[in-house]
Image (cartoon, rainbow, N blue to C red):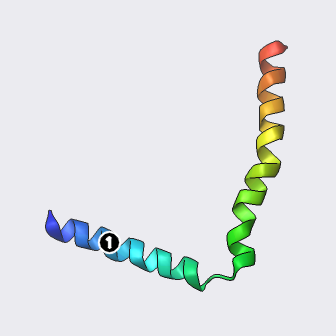
Amino acid sequence: MNTRNQVLNNRYSGLSHLLSTLPWQVRIVPPLVLMLVAPALANIILHGLTA
């Protein structure tokens, strides 16, 4: 059980290291995409409910 946690920790630390090496432009893209897509999705859902 302990080794499994260590493997997960290693995986996450590797992931966070990868993220920290990425430029800020890359890190800022997903939230922007979400902000743009969320209203459109909400509209589609609302129109689907009212239709």
Local packing at callout 1 (Cα closer than 10 Å; few below 14, some 14-19, many 20+) is: few
User: Could you tell me which quadrant the C terminus lies in?
Assistant: top right
- At label 1, the amino acid type is Asn
Q: Where residue 38 appears, x then y in whole percent?
A: 76, 42
**The image quarter in which residue 6 lies:** bottom left
The quarter of the rendered structure image containing the N terminus is: bottom left
Name the residue tied to disc 1: 9
Q: Position of residue 7 (x, y in %)?
A: 28, 72
Indicate the quadrant where residue 11 lies.
Answer: bottom left
Q: Residue furthest top?
A: 50
Where is residue 20? Give x, y as percent. Answer: 56, 81
Is 40 or 35 nearer to us in this picture? 35
The residue that appears at 77% across and 56% down in the rendered structure is 33
Residue lying furthest bottom in this view? Answer: 21
Label 1: state its secondary structure: helix
Q: Residue at x 78, y 37 (%)?
A: 41
Image: 14 above or below 28: below
Residue drawn at (40%, 71%) of the image: 12
47 above or below 13? Answer: above
Q: How many marks?
A: 1
Residue at 78% x, 50% y: name it: 35
